Every structure is written in C-alpha cells, then in structure tokens.
Amino acid sequence: MKKKIKCFNSIKELIFNYKFFISKEIKIKGWVKHFRYNCFIIINDGSTINNLQIFIDKKFYSLVKKINIGISIEVIGVLVLSQGKEQNIEIYANKIKIIGKFSPEELQKTILQPKTHSFKKLREQAYLRFRTSIFSSILRIRHNISFSIHKFFFQKNFMYINTPIITTYDSEGAGEMFRVTNFDLKKIPLNEKGELNNNLDFFGTSTYLTVSGQLQGEAAASGLGKIYTFGPTFRAEKSNTFRHLSEFWMIEPEMSFSKLVHNMNFAEKLLKYVIKFVINNSYEDLFFLEKKNKRKIFKRLNNVLESSFERISYTNAIKILKSRKKVEFLQSINWGEDLKSEHEKFLAENYFNNPIIIYNYPLKIKPFYMRINNDNKTVAAMDIIFPYIGEIIGGSQREERYNVLLKRILELNLNIKSLWWYLNIRRFGSVPHSGFGLGFERLIQYITNIDNIKDVIPFPRYPNHAYF
Amino acid sequence: MKKKIKCFNSIKELIFNYKFFISKEIKIKGWVKHFRYNCFIIINDGSTINNLQIFIDKKFYSLVKKINIGISIEVIGVLVLSQGKEQNIEIYANKIKIIGKFSPEELQKTILQPKTHSFKKLREQAYLRFRTSIFSSILRIRHNISFSIHKFFFQKNFMYINTPIITTYDSEGAGEMFRVTNFDLKKIPLNEKGELNNNLDFFGTSTYLTVSGQLQGEAAASGLGKIYTFGPTFRAEKSNTFRHLSEFWMIEPEMSFSKLVHNMNFAEKLLKYVIKFVINNSYEDLFFLEKKNKRKIFKRLNNVLESSFERISYTNAIKILKSRKKVEFLQSINWGEDLKSEHEKFLAENYFNNPIIIYNYPLKIKPFYMRINNDNKTVAAMDIIFPYIGEIIGGSQREERYNVLLKRILELNLNIKSLWWYLNIRRFGSVPHSGFGLGFERLIQYITNIDNIKDVIPFPRYPNHAYF
C-alpha cells in the first residue's frame, strides 16, 4: 500500500498547521535560500518571510554537490519539532528532487546571491527581486494593505467602481498627461488647416491616460451613494524623485450626502483601520523590515493609532508658522500661498508631533471642483499630513451648487465642452458630497518606512524607465 | 432638551437594523423614486435595490407641489412597521427638507423619468445611469463579484500584484495595442533615416497599453509563489460587438509549482466561490434583474454550482464535432484549427449542457509561452467554456524549460530584445507554473445575464467612444 504523503501548497500553510502533522511524512517545495554545514538546506517559497529548514543525512551527500542557492527543489520528509531556536519545525529529508538548477557561476550575476544588495541593484533586476527577502516582504505587506482597503470599504457599504483609464480630459486642470493614440506616428493625419485630425484617431477624439477617477467617481456616487475607486493613475511629469512615479495606484472614495467633517472622520478611520490590519496580518514582515533596514516601523504606526489627528485650519496654520521666530524656513510663507513641504514637516513633526489635518485652504491654490466656503476666500479642502512623509491624503467637499460651479469653470477658462456632464450632475438632484484621494504607494512607503517609492511597486515607471 | 435623532448613513443600514428603531425618530436621505396618491414619497439612495416609503400627512401638502421624481431630500420621521405588502417599514415624516431640486420639464430630458429606457438610451446618459434601478443593480453585483475575487485569493494566500499598465511589448504577440506617448503629435521627432526617434519619448522607448499582466505576473509568482493580478487591460481592435471593449478588467492568477490539472481545479473553485458569494450577497439585485429583464439567472448560476466542469481534450472535442452528422455547422472544423464559437456553443450547450474545460490545444494556434506536451503537437492549454456565453477563462501551464522556450521564441521570430528577462525567469531556479486569465466584464455578463458588455462597466470605451 502506498503511503499517504501530505502535500502542502505553501510553507505558510505548513507553519500554520504543523501541529497536526508532527512525525508525519509531508511534501513541500521551494527555492534554496541557504546551506548550512552540509547538513541543512533552508528553503523559502515566497508565501512567508519564514524559511523552512531541511535536515539532510549522509545519503544525500552526493546530491548536495549539485545544490546551490537559488535552485528550486521538492522535498519529501518527516516533519519534526526543531531543536534550533530559529524555527519551530524542520523536515528530515527522505527524498529530494531538484526541479530547476543553475550554476554557482550564474548565481554570481544575479541579486539572488546571498549578500545585501542596494535597492538600486535590486531594481535593475526587478524581474528577479520578488525572490529576495526584502522585496517579497514589501510586496506581501502591499498585498495586505490592498486587501484591508477593499475590506474596509466593503464593510462600510461603499461600492467599488472602475473609472476609465482612457479619458478625454484633465480632471485636475493642470497635470501633464500621456496621450493615448492609435495613429501611425510617422503618418499623423492633419486637416486642411494643418491641425491634428483627432477625429480620425481610435476614439474619434484625442485621448489621454487618466490622472484621477474623481469626476467619474462623483457621477457614480450621485447614484450609488457611496463609492470608491482603486486603480492606476498617470502623470507625465519629468520628475524623478523618491516620491514620484509616472504610473501609480490611487484610492478615491466619494460620498453623497456628506460634508467636509465627515470626509475627515472617514479618512482618519480608513487609515487607522489599514494600519491595524497590517500590523495584525503582516507582523512578521514588518518586524523583518524593521530589523533589516534599522528603521522604526511599529513605533510610528502605533503613534498613528494612538493619536487623534490634529485638525487645524489653513489660516491658523499660517499663524503658527509666522509666529515661529526661531525657526528658519528656507521659503517664507504668507496667507494665500501653498504650504511647502518644510512647513508641513514643521507642523506635523515639530509642532504637533502627530498626523494633522489642514482644512479650508485659499480658493486660489485649489482645483475648481472644491466647494467655496461662505467667506468666499477659502474652499472646503482638507489635506492629511503625516510626520516624516508629508501629504498622504488630499480631499474636499465638492461644489454641489450648479451656478457656483459654472461660474468657477468659466472664470478659470476650463473646457466646458468636456465638463458639461460633470456640471450636469449638479442639475438633476444635486447633493452635498465629498471625497479624497489616497496615493497607494505613498501609504505603503509610510507603513514600510521605505525611502524610495520605486521600491514599493513591482515594476516602477518613471522618465526613461519602462523596463520589464 | 434636544431630542436624539438616529441618523442613518444609508437605507441599507436602516433596513438591516430597523428592529431596534421602531417608533423612534430617525433621519435619512435619498433621491425621490416615486410618488403615490400624494401621501407617499418613495426614496432610494443607491445602497440597495429596496426603496423606502415615506408617509406624508396634510401638513406637507404645500411642500408636495415642489416635489418631483429625481430630486434629493432629507427626511426626519418616525420609523413604523408598514401595513403594505411591499415593504417591512416606512417613515411617518415629521420634517422634509429639499436638498437638490429641478423642474419636471428638466426631468423629461433625462433617463431619470420613470419609464423603461433602452440600455442604449441609458448609455447615452452614462453619467446619470447610476441612478437607475437596473444599472445600480448591475454595479452593486459587479462590486460583490470584485470583492469575492479579492477575498477568495486572500484566503488562498495569493498575493495581489499590480502589473504595469504602460509596457514596451505585446505579451500576446498578436493584439493591436494603443501607443502611449508624450510627443507633440504635430512635431514627431525623426532621426536622420526618417525613422521615429523613440528614444526621445518620455520613457526613452516606444510604449503601449498592456494587453495582459501575465508575463510580469509569472516573474512575481517565481518569487512569491502564488499571485494574482486584477487590473485594466486594453485592445486597440476596431470591433464593436456585444462582447468586446477597448478597455476591460482582467483577473490573472499565476501559480508556481503548479501544473495544468491544478490550474483547472483552481479555476473551477474560483468561479464557484464567486457565484456562491454573489448569490448570498446580491440576492435581491439578482432577483430584481431576473424579474425586470425576464431572463433566467438563478437557474443558470445553480447549474454551474451543481455541475462538475466536464473536461475534454481538444482532440476528443474535434472527434465529437466531426461525428455529429446531423448538426450543420456554418464552419467546418478539422484538427489543428481553432474552435469557432458555434462549436464551443454546441459542446457546452447541446452536447454536455454544462460548463466544459477543453485542454491540450494544438501548438500552432496558441501563444508562445504555453508548455509543449510530450506529443510535440499540443500545448498544455485550457479554456473554460460556459453555456450561452462561450469562453470565460483561458489559461495554460507555462513553458518553464529555458531551451524549449528560447527555441519557440526564435521560431516565431518574436522580439527577443524585449523578452530576455521573461526568458531569464527560466534560468535561475525555474519551476513548473501555470495560470489563466478571466475577463471580469464577461464574468459579470454571465452572472447578470446582460447581453451587451457595455452595460456592465461604468464608462465603456470602444471605437469612437470615450465619452465622460
């Protein structure tokens, strides 16, 4: 009779269920992470930061010569409690099968070789970095952040909406956009006047990659009540910094029958929920990153959980900044000007030492769709500023009054031809509504305390870089 | 002392919790759906297909004149059990506030007027159709399908991966792709030879919108073990049919250490989980659609749940099709040719009357990355065909042998310069792996039994159509 061997789908499942299988024969697969004293092989399969130790006795000594770090193997063996301090369990190998092998010389060329590589080096072999402890940790955390966001909105009865990626207009009225076209770029059709014949393009008009799903999100919320988007957005800015990507993911909730204060309350709840979820579900990966990168993670996250976000109007923020005689800012600040990151930094890190919400910004420095306050000088905007990272959320109550919005669109000389439908949302049963945008990668950066945004996304896109 | 009024965030929450608030004063908001006999106002807020009935007495008779369908109102009133058969509860209004009003004449112009509009008409006012019962039902179901997919993968320890939208190559080796560019289309830079100077474009090379995240997904799975993508994909095909969109969402799982049979098992589990989840969570919306559209929904869905997907090799499928002497196919079929939809239809609807999985397709009709079987004539591909809708999933075991894959890339004359890294995944610890693609909108179409794919996505994109 054939022996029954328990096959595990992943090391994570094995570790979770090991108590039921002690002294039983099991089968498990993974990539070789380390080798110790010719009697241990340590494997990992990406499901968890925890490795699995395989004990090999004499009968494998000829096989051992063929094994090097990075190759993939299948192991059948007996699960036992480990004597070592570093793990609960290990496997006494009965059978080892090499699946995918390569030479130690080839290993030298890759980031799979066991030493600390710079983040830059990892990025150069981005298609392989999923195999490294550090990047797989970051991506497992990314996964949990993503799921926690969907779960939170699901529980709160927000409908997930996919707003279009290909659009005909610029919702921010400012950002540089990528053109999407089906033209043969060597034979661009021009009309008699020498102008682009955009109506011959695929969509019968000029089209671009979206910079935000907000406007369509507002339309959806004006029927479904409460919605959120979670999708890719794009900026064709030539900035190559630690905080910018040309392609990044955004979460944009939009709530009907909701004013600025609800928006603030809700954003604070969302951020705290996500952080709690991630601490509970990614504890080991966060712990690994904290040790590996020698950066505080848990302390920062707990600070957010324990604090009540400080709320301060833009006008009062300016007052505080102007009253700090001892603080030398590189750039001075006056009412009506946008806060620079050094000002935000000072307020969040030094003055309040807390996440802060700054609200009621001057009308002139904010987009057209924000609701004008009674003072006619400010809009019902709010930005959430985190210590050490800066703005993490930007939102507002939206202008729901048809005539006020129309006046603003005309004043700013925006393209009414592409905004008519957005304006029309205010015509047929308009309601106060508000929402915000949360940059997904910025949030991951904050939670993982990773400096460069390019290291928290699988395949980063930025100027001159669309590799893999 | 001010009376305490319970404010509900949504009608869904009120209906869920009504038992605790009978005879209490509550506050609720929504859009007017109907009017009855001047003594009832029926409102809805998009959170559920269920409306809320507001009873109004004489004191509101002057207000009633200002009310018409579509406007938004806020109601304070006493929650009571309803005498009517159509609802459990209703509100005796104490106070009604009109939030956003507009005239009955304006109403006539919109799809908000209470009559049955064609799907085409709804699409023409896509920014307003979220307010209609039928489209809001479809989108609430879409939301639940989406969440069920994330939940299933989360439970199965698959990591959610965001593969890039902007890519440099065509992973299917066939599809027409949209170009993404930052060039001024009136001043395209050419080099001395009159060729496009693509290295001057934003990314230093020519870039396109992705047609699939599979290749990058394979890279991720080769480190994280099991992953899935769920993101937008694009086709620049000039097809305007009931089953095609230029922009649609895809789910693409990829599993390391996994062969074709696991792939089939897993796909079947996923589809059944999603359908079960949706029946449980969207029962009322599905019920509404079944009645409204006079289309079978529950019977079809239960058939899928109760059936075991029939598995049949391509070769056997051809044998069955050729042996049916009485069936007249428009197009004949021979071994080596791709099945046409009439053939798939016959097999799924007439022959098996069941979802079917056809596997081991001829090498020549499938993409380069599928694993070549020992017969050297077929590949380890699998398509899942549903009755009445056709192919819903296409997948395969991937070619994990470096030399075999290299040979295939060269034979097909594919661009090795953009595929080197994909090939390299097979160089450093290659493992058998497999995965599939599931078209999100096709799945929604099947579940909701909606004919046109344009009616299951908020803002459809297709040739000459990128409105809103």
Image (cartoon, coloured by chain):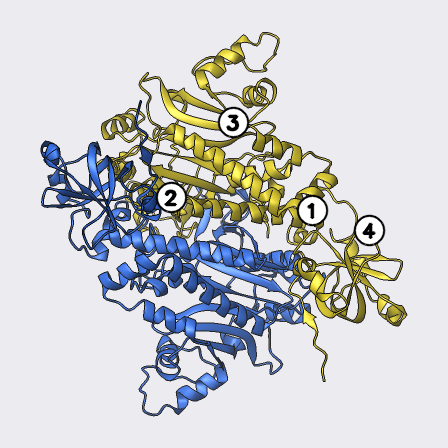
Chain colours: A yellow, B blue
Label whose residue precedes the other's in the sequence (3 or 4): 4
Foreground: disc 2 or disc 1: 2
Answer with left or right where residue B203 lies relative to residue B46: right
A77, B339: nearer the viewer: A77
Count of numbered marks: 4
Q: Which residue is mark 4?
A: A85
Label ID, residue A134: 1
Between residue B93 and residue B273, name the one nearer to us.
B93
Badge 2: few (under 14), some or many (20 or more) residues near its Cα, within 10 Å? Answer: many
Tag 4: amino acid:
Lys
Q: Residues within 10 Å of mark 3 (few under 14, many from 20)?
A: some
Kindly identify which residue carries mark 2: A227
Q: Answer left or right for B245 relative to A86.
A: left
In this rendering, the answer to whether B155 lies above or below B333 is above
Disc 4 crowd, CA 10 A, few/some/many (<14, 14-19, 20+): few
Q: Residues within 10 Å of mark 1 (few under 14, many from 20)?
A: many
Please name the residue that numbered disc 3 is placed on: A309
Residue contact between numbered discs 1 and 4, judged by CB atoms under 8 Å: no
Q: What residue appears at the point 64 percent right and 53 percent down from the top-left corner?
A: A127
Query: How far apart are the two marked residues, 3 and 4, measured between alpha carbons?
Result: 41 Å
- Is A116 above or below relative to B251? above
Chain of residue at mark 4 = A
Picture coordinates of residue A85, whole percent (x, y) = 82, 51
Camera-near label (2 vs 4) is 4
x, y percent for residue B291: 24, 63
Chain under callout 1: A
